[in-house]
Image (tube, rainbow, N blue to C red):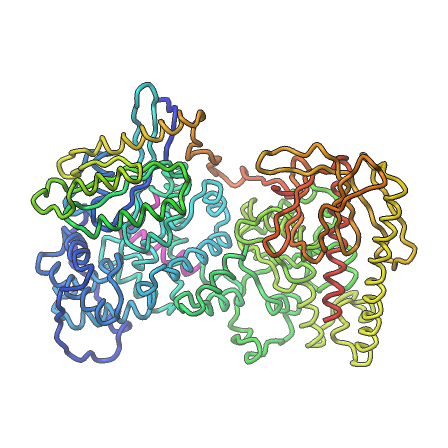
């Protein structure tokens, strides 16, 4: 499948809110109740089509704990979209979303698009964050809000595809494609004879 | 699927090494009431979820909670992975208080502040050292990662955070890795294991591209004993296959000291490669001499140092080689200073030594590279030789030469060490040697200092005279387009012999365009002055004056050599110029670099 656009998306949120589960459900259609905690980031790919545009989503599924905050800039560099996940049964995890938004506003690409996912909505009875409050917050920061369940699959496709749509919208408004995350060169070293670097005689201004 | 595996490995030795003293019995209990208790509970439930029983998961939560309370730290993911291999020992009858003690002992030994520091700076220390070691031992993989923008943060976090527990499904192999760490008594040993891991699975990793690479590395698990044996052998070999001083230096780095970690990270991040010391050079050039003084050099005796063959490559230009040449060193073809093609071919001359010999590159003095990424351009202290050292390093590494280092302090420091031990340097004449000033008699030093002071006074006078002369010259003639002029200054000393100016335009990086107006850029010995040309040729407005001592770097584009950028100290905005005549930028930069190096030399002499 020929790809017209390629976007990097990061998943962010407190530990064990279900970031990996959402990404796995979306990309592989799988759900594991006992998904191990993420220490390394996962990198997943999915090709989708929005209207007439074929898009490759590079999903960087990150670890949730504070360790990640120290390393985060490396992850969300060049990200065009962020899926901010909280657990509807855990109020604290929603406040973490708020702090992630602040962090991204300061550190990430200014064009980054947000979608907020209230995950584990299959546990509606244990809900601690009123849906209205979450939606109001999302509206306030110009993000979309989705109720999701990685377990049942509810809202999963929609929230990822919404990010892609938001990025495409930003592209069309700005009049030029937002630079893809694959702008960098790709070189695969196959053997020892291939790499011959040129002598450095100057540099970038 | 994870293999159901209770430990078959005889762990007694491992546990004894870990904790030789008797463990006093105590009760394991903890109120499960930490603010992030919910995370501890969830993680306990999903740690090795197919292996641990519900009771073990409950115990895991209690043990982790107790540890966090006792150590007054918040729970962090990774602790659970380390605790699990100890907890499973409970099945063999090891009581929980011992399980807890072993875990605590292991963390305090090998990851003492890893879970204490909120910014995970020790983890970042691992990454920086890992990158340097990878470049040293496996430049192909290092180049491959750099080209594909792969950072160890993306795949090695769990290696270092969990001492590989998160990457090994088989408990027996985890104990073996940890036992090796104890035997090596080296907190950085996981770095070698990590590189060995990459080497072992190289073929699997390097067929991928882009972000698939990091995913593929992340997914590789160390599953069987055969892989383990090979990886550990490689890791040990890597560690031992390093010059003694490098090993010593690495051993002295404490990435877990939170009081010094920031400066440690700064120093390591600014290193392009691992560096060797003049002491190592002495081992090469005078192998028959016993110059080692354990107390002074903080080293063990010579007999215990490495036996790896070393090629000492003297990279200084001809003029500097006149100050002396070390025996048993090889001089690089000095035509590299004139011909780029020859420079590119230099590593080919040593291809048979690749991977067998360690290559020490010897410059004239302290090498000041621009960090791991090696930004292009020369810093203020870099002279011709320094720039060449950067080029050579890059070329050797890009051509896959492992074990390439720079000698700290260059010829100067090695020279001083030789003088200290009265070792003979070939072609060395004390009277001609710029470094011998430090070893001359006090009366000679005083005499030299007098001369320097006099020279400095003359130069101060020179600048004001020079500027006046230039002003007069400008007032007399304004025609400068595409021309450069040399203004002879009558009062100059021999080495400060010219002032030149160049026609140029201002370059705006943000719009990538240059100004309509033409400026004159004057290069004097202490100062750079940018004049705005006026229609009235007798008038010239000074736009910018820059002291050469405020310059930190001058760069020019590889493809557009007439685009020159000047970087300054104290957050001053860079000055970007397009020199009008394409033939002159090199001369402009060379002249500035010459003045920089003269100022550098005099400043040092004054000191």
How far across and down, in percent of the image, does residue B147 sit? 49, 41
Question: Where on the picture, by quarter, is residue B312?
Answer: bottom right
How far across and down, in percent of the image, does residue A123 sit? 10, 43
Q: Can residue B219 be seen in this snapshot?
A: no
In-image side of B315 versus B192 (left or right): right
**Main secondary structure found in the magenta portion:** helix
Residue B453 vertical position relative to residue A144 in the rendered view, above or below? below
Residue A176 vertical position relative to residue B260 in the rendered view, above or below? above
Residue A17 vertical position relative to residue B423 in the rendered view, above or below? above
Instruction: Tell me which residue sits at (75%, 76%) in the image.
Output: B439
Front residue (pair A114, B411) = A114
Front residue (pair B340, B327) = B340
Front residue (pair B282, A171) = A171
Q: Which quarter of the rendering shows the N terminus of chain B?
A: top left
How far across and down, in percent of the image, does residue B103 sit? 24, 68
Residue that sits furthest to the right in the current view: B490
Q: Does the magenta stretch include residue B219?
A: yes
Question: Where on the picture, by quarter, is residue B192?
Answer: bottom left
Number of numbered labels in the structure image: 0
Residue that sits furthest to the top in the current view: A52
How far across and down, in percent of the image, does residue B471 sit? 85, 48
Instruction: Tell me which residue sits at (44%, 65%) in the image.
Output: B261
In-image side of A61 versus B429 (left or right): left
Q: Can residue B234 be seen in this snapshot?
A: yes
Q: Which quarter of the rendering shows the C terminus of chain B?
A: bottom right
What range of the chain is rendered magenta?
B216-237
Q: Is residue B445 magenta?
A: no
Front residue (pair B165, A91) = A91
Instruction: Tell me which residue sits at (45%, 42%) in the image.
Output: B149
């Amino acid at each position: 499948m020929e790809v017209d656009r390629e976007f990097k998306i990061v998943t962010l949120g407190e530990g064990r809110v279900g970031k990996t589960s959402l990404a796995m459900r979306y990309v592989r259609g799988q759900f594991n109740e006992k998904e191990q905690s993420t220490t390394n980031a996962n990198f997943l790919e999915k090709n989708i089509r929005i209207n007439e545009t074929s898009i490759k989503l590079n999903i960087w599924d990150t670890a949730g704990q504070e360790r990640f905050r120290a390393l985060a800039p490396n992850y969300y560099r060049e990200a065009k979209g962020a899926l901010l996940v909280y657990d509807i049964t855990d109020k604290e995890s929603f406040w973490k979303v708020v702090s992630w938004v602040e962090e991204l506003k300061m550190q990430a690409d200014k064009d980054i698009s947000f979608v907020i996912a209230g995950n584990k909505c299959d546990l509606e009875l244990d809900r601690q964050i009123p849906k209205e409050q979450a939606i109001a917050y999302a509206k306030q920061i110009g993000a979309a809000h989705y109720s999701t369940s990685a377990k049942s699959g509810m809202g999963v496709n929609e929230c990822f595809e919404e990010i892609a749509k938001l990025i495409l919208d930003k592209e069309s408004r700005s009049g030029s494609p937002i630079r893809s995350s694959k702008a960098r060169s790709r070189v695969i070293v196959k053997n020892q004879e291939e790499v011959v670097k040129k002598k450095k005689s100057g540099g970038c201004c | 699927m994870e293999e159901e595996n209770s430990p078959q490995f005889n762990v007694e030795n491992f546990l004894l090494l870990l904790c030789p003293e008797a463990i006093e019995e105590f009760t394991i209990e903890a109120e499960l009431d930490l603010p992030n208790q919910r995370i501890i509970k969830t993680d306990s439930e999903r740690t090795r979820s197919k292996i641990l029983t519900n009771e073990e998961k409950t115990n895991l939560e209690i043990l982790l909670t107790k540890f966090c309370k006792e150590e007054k730290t918040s729970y962090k993911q990774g602790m659970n992975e380390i605790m699990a291999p100890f907890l499973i020992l409970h099945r063999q009858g090891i009581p929980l208080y011992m399980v807890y003690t072993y875990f605590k002992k292991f963390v305090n030994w090998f990851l003492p502040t890893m879970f204490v520091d909120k910014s995970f700076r020790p983890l970042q220390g691992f990454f920086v050292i890992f990158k340097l070691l990878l470049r040293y031992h496996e430049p192909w993989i290092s180049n491959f990662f750099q080209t594909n923008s792969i950072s160890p943060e993306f795949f090695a976090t769990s290696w270092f955070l969990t001492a590989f527990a998160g990457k090994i499904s088989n408990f027996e192999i985890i104990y073996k890795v940890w036992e090796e760490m104890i035997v090596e008594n080296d907190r950085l040993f996981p770095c070698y294991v990590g590189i060995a891991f990459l080497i072992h699975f190289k073929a699997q990793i390097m067929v991928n591209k882009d972000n698939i690479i990091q995913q593929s590395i992340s997914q590789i698990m160390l599953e069987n004993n055969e892989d383990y044996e090979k990886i550990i052998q490689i890791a040990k070999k890597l560690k031992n296959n390093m010059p003694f001083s490098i090993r010593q230096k690495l051993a002295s780095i404490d990435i877990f000291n939170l009081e010094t970690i920031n400066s440690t990270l700064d120093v390591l991040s600014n290193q392009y490669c691992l560096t060797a010391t003049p002491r190592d050079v002495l081992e090469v050039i005078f192998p028959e001499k016993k110059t080692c003084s354990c107390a002074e050099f903080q080293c063990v005796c010579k007999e215990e140092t490495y036996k790896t063959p070393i090629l000492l490559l003297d990279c200084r230009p001809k003029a500097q080689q006149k100050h002396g040449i070390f025996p048993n060193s090889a001089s690089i073809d000095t035509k590299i200073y004139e011909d780029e093609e020859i420079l590119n071919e230099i590593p080919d001359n040593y291809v048979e030594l690749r991977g067998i010999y360690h290559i020490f590159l010897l410059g004239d003095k302290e090498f000041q590279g621009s960090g791991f990424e090696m930004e292009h351009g020369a810093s203020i202290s870099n002279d011709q030789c320094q720039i060449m050292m950067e080029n050579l390093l890059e070329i050797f590494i890009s051509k896959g030469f492992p074990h390439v280092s720079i000698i700290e302090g260059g010829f100067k420091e090695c020279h001083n060490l030789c003088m200290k031990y009265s070792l003979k340097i070939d072609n060395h004449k004390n009277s001609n040697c710029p470094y011998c000033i430090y070893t001359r008699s006090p009366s000679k030093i005083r005499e030299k200092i007098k001369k320097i002071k006099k020279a400095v006074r003359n130069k101060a006078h020179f600048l004001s005279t020079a500027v006046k002369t230039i002003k007069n010259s400008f007032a007399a003639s304004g025609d400068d387009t595409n021309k450069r002029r040399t203004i002879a200054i009558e009062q100059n000393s021999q080495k400060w012999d010219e002032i030149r100016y160049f026609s140029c335009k201002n370059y705006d990086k943000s719009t990538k365009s240059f100004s309509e107006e033409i400026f004159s850029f004057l290069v004097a010995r202490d100062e750079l002055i940018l004049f705005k040309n006026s229609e009235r040729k007798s008038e010239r407005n000074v736009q910018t004056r820059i002291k050469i001592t405020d310059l930190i770097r001058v760069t020019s584009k590889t493809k557009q050599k007439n685009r020159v950028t000047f970087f300054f100290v104290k957050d001053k905005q860079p000055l970007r110029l397009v020199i009008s005549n394409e033939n002159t930028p090199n001369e402009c930069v060379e002249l500035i670099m010459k003045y920089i190096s003269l100022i550098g030399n005099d400043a040092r002499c004054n000191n």
